[in-house]
Image (cartoon, rainbow, N blue to C red):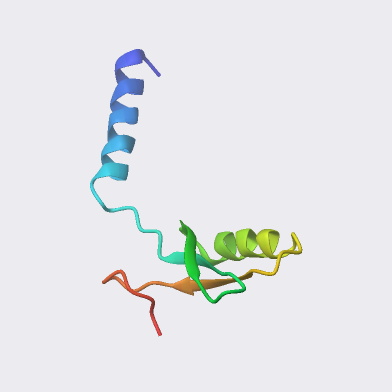
Amino acid sequence: MGRGAAQAAVGKWRGAMNDGTVTLPWLVVRQDDNGNRYRVGRYATRAEAERIADSLDGRGHKQLYWVERISRAGTPAD
């Protein structure tokens, strides 16, 4: 691949990341022992989110971690 083609490919990838078309519908949420909830991260697949939640949960802290899917509107889906 020549330099021009490589730059075009990178530009195409960057555009895809910046135009809002990349969806990360899976959230990892943490709840501390005081009941406060925090979004840990957003992920493309449920498996990826569960892997992160499991690794955090395995650290032995008192926090609770779980995975939620968000709707297209950006709110947790029921």
Out of 20 and 7, give the one closest to the viewer. 20
Which residue appears at 28% of the width and 53% of the height?
21
**Viewed as shown, does residue 1 lie left or right of 47?**
left
The N terminus is located in which quarter?
A: top left
- Count of numbered badges drawn on the protein: 0
In the image, is residue 18 above or below residue 7?
A: below
- Residue that protrudes farthest toward the front in the picture: 34
**Residue 3 pos. (x, y %):** 35, 14
Q: Is residue 16 left or right of residue 53?
A: left
At x 59% / y 70%, what residue is drawn?
32
Image x and y of residue 66, in percent: 57, 72
Residue 14 occupies which quadrant of the picture? top left
- Residue 65 lies, with reference to residue 21, above or below; the image says below
Q: Position of residue 30 (x, y in %)?
A: 55, 67
Q: Quadrant of residue 5?
A: top left
In the picture as drawn, the residue positioned furthest to the left comes out as 19
The extreme bottom residue here reads 78
Task: Check the picture and name the quadrant holding the C terminus.
Answer: bottom left
**What residue is rendered at 57% in x and 59% in y?**
48
Comparing 4 with 22, the one in front is 22
Please say if 57 is above or below 1: below
Q: Residue at x 44, y 73 (%)?
A: 69
Quadrant housing residue 7: top left
